[in-house]
Amino acid sequence: VILQTLHPDHPGLELLLSRGYEAYARWQLEERVAAGLPPVGFQALLRAEAHQKQQVEQFLKEATTVFPAGATRVFGPMPAIMERLGGRSRMYLMLLSESRRDLHAQIDPWLPRLRALKTARKVRWSIDVDPQEL
């Protein structure tokens, strides 16, 4: 196995190399539990893209303001891992909840609010529940 990294001194990588996968997996699960990330928490992404970055940012900022109050935490807007693809700027909001039911209970009334935003017509957007990749 060849491993290439910009961060050879990362604690997770050092643990993996010195103590093996099982120790690394336990450490990673502890980190995820502390942060409320899957598999103990529930996640959704509001993905948005447009030719102009300002339109994407504006839509996601407005989307945050119309998100229903509740237990779900909203993070972002943040750039996608590949921020530009095919001449389009891509960003997202991350939603985290301790309960799948709470997450869905807040997303359901949010959809019509998103559709009603004027900026929603200037961007391509989608909601990804339980995203497999960022």
Image (cartoon, rainbow, N blue to C red):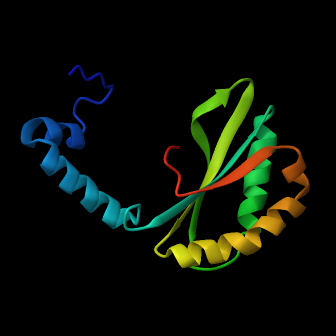
The image quadrant that residue 76 belongs to is bottom right
If the image is split into quadrants, where does the N terminus sit?
top left
Q: Is residue 88 left or right of residue 76?
A: right
Residue 3 in the image: x percent, y percent? 25, 23
Query: What is the count of numbered marks?
Result: 0
- Residue 124, position as x, y percentages in the image: 79, 43
Relative to 95, residue 86 above or below: above
Which residue is drawn at the image coordinates 50% and 44% (left, top)? 133
Which residue is more in the foreground, 101 or 59? 101
Q: Is residue 91 left or right of residue 95?
A: right
Residue lying at the far left in this picture: please name it. 19
| Horizontal side, residue 72 vs residue 115: left or right | left
Residue 7 lies, with reference to residue 103, above or below; the image says: above
Residue sitting at x 40%, y 61%: 38
Residue lying at 74% horizontally and 46% vertically, measured from the top left: 57
Residue under the point 8% across and 38% down: 18
What is the x, y in percent for residue 9? 22, 33
Quarter of the image where one finds residue 107: bottom right
